[in-house]
Amino acid sequence: MMRLYYSPGACSLTQHILLCMSGMEFSVERVDLKTKQTEHKRDFREVNPHGQVPTLELDNHTILTENIAIAQYIADKTPSANLIAPVGHDDRYQTLSWLSYVATELHKAYGPIFKSSVQAEKDAAIKVLEDKFQALDARLKDRKFIATESFTIADAYLYVVLRWRKIIPNLPSYPAIDSFMQRVESLPAVQQALKQEGLMA
């Protein structure tokens, strides 16, 4: 059985959601990212030398790392879940485009907020994020999902990264983003993953 190594609310929640949607059998193991210990007292760096989540251990004990790679693996292994269009279909590349945007432009932009002790750096990062939130809100104004007409791996990642907005004080309102978040959070697989990670309100 596959095993997902995760930290509650981290970007690994993306893969947790997608695994719940896929219908594949899997287990989860929580990782303390500060101590690099798993909930079973294993040195996580023995699994992933980078010490980062998400990490997916396949049935044959092959280790997969990195958000984008694992998301595509799950989607391609379970085509009936319709998490990404087939190779050659235009929708596939729209999905990958937005998946990459979330990884390189949105996720990365939170870095100074999480890691810097310099307030000016945090403030600059918040300004960058506010500009990106405004653009995303405009994109989602007349759409249910970010890339295509149906839920894809890009939406799972976007949902997880947008959950982190709660750490930013005094953000303006983004009605379309809020609607998107409610829409995604109502999905049974998302509810399942949130519950398993202890993130339900």
Image: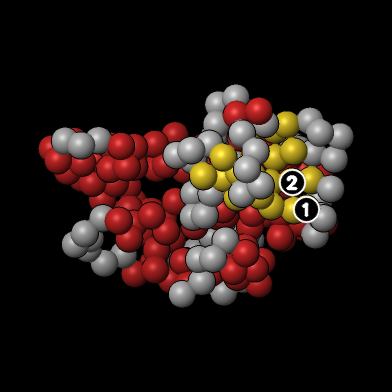
Amino acid at the residue labelled 2: Arg
Query: Of the residues shown, which amino acid type is indicated by label 1?
Result: Phe
Name the side, left or right, on which 94 lies relative to 172: right
- At 61% from the left edge and 49% from the top edge, which residue is drawn? 39
In the visual, does 175 lie left or right of 73?
Answer: left
Secondary structure of the residue carrying numbered label 2: strand
Q: Residues within 10 Å of mark 2 (few under 14, many from 20)?
A: some
Residue 124 in picture, x, y percent from top left: 18, 39
Q: Residues within 10 Å of mark 1 (few under 14, many from 20)?
A: some
Q: Is residue 57 above or below residue 16?
A: above
Q: Residue furthest front?
A: 41
- Taking depth in this image into account, of 53 and 35 the one nearest to the observer is 35
Answer yes or no: is residue 137 visible.
yes
Coloring scheme used: secondary structure
Residue at the spot 39% in from the left edge and 42% down from the top edge: 106
Check disc 1 and report the residue beneath it.
26
Residue 81 percent across, percent down from the top left: 77, 58
Mark 2, residue position:
3
Q: Position of residue 79 (x, y in %)?
A: 81, 50
Q: Are marks 1 and 2 in contact (CB under 8 Å)?
A: yes
